[in-house]
Image: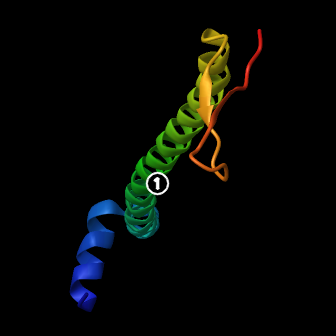
């Protein structure tokens, strides 16, 4: 600022002029810091949202596989126990004989 502008402001505000200048400088620094941190927070928020969606997808996939395998593991014995004399094809025999495998 030109010398005359500083004199005019000093005459207008008196001793408070230095406090106003200090407050303006501090306010400018705080606004710059807030601007920088908001950009970082927004980037982290967007990254977090994307990672959260990816984690949800992976968790859903893992739970789906776990439930599918649990169902399969539970259904095989239940199926074999449901029919007391089930006939099972035994490979390696001439003609592929069948034999009783569960005697309940």
Looking at the picture, does residue 70 appear above or below residue 47? above
The quadrant of the picture occupied by the C terminus is top right
Q: Quadrant of the N terminus?
A: bottom left
Q: Residue at x 61, y 20 (%)?
A: 86
Q: Is residue 98 left or right of residue 58?
A: right
Query: Dot 1: few (<14), some (14–19), or many (≥20) neighbours within 10 Å?
Result: few
Q: Is residue 24 left or right of residue 86?
A: left
Residue 8, compared with residue 2, is above or below; it is above
Write down the residue under mark 1. Answer: 48
Q: Position of residue 40 (x, y in %)?
A: 44, 65
Residue 33's spot in the image, x, y percent? Answer: 46, 67
In depth, the one of 77 and 95 nearer the eye is 95
Looking at the rendered structure, the number of numbered marks drawn on it comes to: 1
* Residue depicted at 61% across the width and 32% down the height: 88
Q: Position of residue 54 (x, y in %)?
A: 44, 53
Image quadrant assignment for residue 50: bottom left
Residue drawn at x 41%, y 48% is 53
Q: What residue is rendered at 67% in x and 53% in y? A: 92
The answer to which of 32 and 95 lies nearer the viewer is 95
Q: Residue furthest bottom?
A: 2
Whether residue 58 is visible, yes or no, is yes
Image position of 97 with respect to 4: above or below: above
């Amino acid at each position: 600022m030109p010398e005359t502008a500083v004199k005019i402001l000093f005459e207008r505000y008196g001793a408070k002029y230095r406090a106003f200048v200090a407050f303006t400088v501090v306010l400018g620094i705080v606004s710059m810091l807030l601007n920088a941190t908001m950009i970082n927070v927004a980037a982290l928020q967007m990254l977090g949202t994307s990672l959260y969606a990816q984690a949800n997808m992976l968790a859903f996939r893992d739970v789906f596989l776990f439930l599918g395998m649990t169902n399969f593991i539970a259904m095989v014995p239940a199926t074999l126990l449901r029919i007391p004399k089930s006939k099972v094809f035994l490979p390696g025999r001439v003609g592929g004989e069948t034999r009783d495998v569960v005697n309940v």
